[in-house]
Amino acid sequence: MTKKMYVVAAVAVLAFLTLFGISSEAVVTEFEHFSIDVPAGWIVEEDKESNTAYFFSPNFAAVLTVAMIENEEGKSLDEWAVTLRNEMRGTNLEKSGSVYTFEFESEGIPSRAAVAENEMIVFLTVIGGHDDIEKMISSFTMTAVTPAVPLV
């Protein structure tokens, strides 16, 4: 009988945490060259050596990657967009304002990328899908120069 009480108590605690304790709110997360709203439950990994951050959805159905690239070669944004699209074997290179986008496949998964510039080249990729992705991308702000400039 005691084991049943523990099980019922554990289920009650989990239900309480699910309803009240786990916030679905996003938290603004600051990195060296950008900030982004990260929803609750997402896993964030940062590789400072390569200026890259990885954002994994709670169910691992999607990953958002943000890479900041120093433009030591002095390439134009147009050249970077074409180079990155070619490296990713991408298609449908389009320009909207100062942002280039293209599509590519990653292990058979339809994916997309954006390339923009603000002192550094920002290369953002999305592999897979999740409802939070668009909100995250909309919240992305490059902070390499003042004032901060939104990506989209």
Image (tube, grey):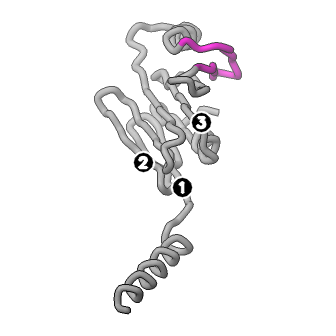
- Residue drawn at x 47%, y 32% as measured from the top left: 66
User: Residue farthest to the front?
Assistant: 1
Q: CA distance from mark 1 to mark 2?
A: 12 Å
> Is 150 rendered above or below residue 88?
below
User: Looking at the figure, which quarter contains the N terminus?
Assistant: bottom left
Visible in this render: residue 146?
A: no
Residue position for label 1: 26
Classified by dominant secondary structure, the portion drawn in magenta counts as strand
Task: Of the two numbered discs 1 and 3 on the same chain, state the one appearing first in sequence.
Answer: 1
> Is 63 rendered above or below residue 23?
above
- Residue drawn at x 53%, y 48% as measured from the top left: 37
Magenta segment: 89-104
Label total for image: 3
x and y, in percent, of residue 7 in the image: 41, 81
Q: Amino acid at mark 3?
A: Pro
Q: Quadrant of residue 140?
A: top right
Task: Of the two numbered discs 1 and 2 on the same chain, state the one appearing first in sequence.
Answer: 1
The residue closer to the viewer here, 12 or 24, is: 12
> Which one is closest to the eye, mark 1 or mark 3?
1
Crowding at label 3, few (<14), some or many (≥20) Cα neighbours within 10 Å? some
Residue position for label 3: 150
Q: Is residue 75 left or right of residue 102?
A: left
The residue closer to the viewer here, 118 or 132, is: 132
Q: CA distance from mark 3 to mark 2?
A: 23 Å
Crowding at label 1, few (<14), some or many (≥20) Cα neighbours within 10 Å? some
Q: Which mark is residue 43?
A: 2
x and y, in percent, of residue 122 in the image: 49, 25
Secondary structure under tag 2 reads: strand
Q: Is residue 141 left or right of residue 49?
A: right
- Residue drawn at x 57%, y 35% as measured from the top left: 128
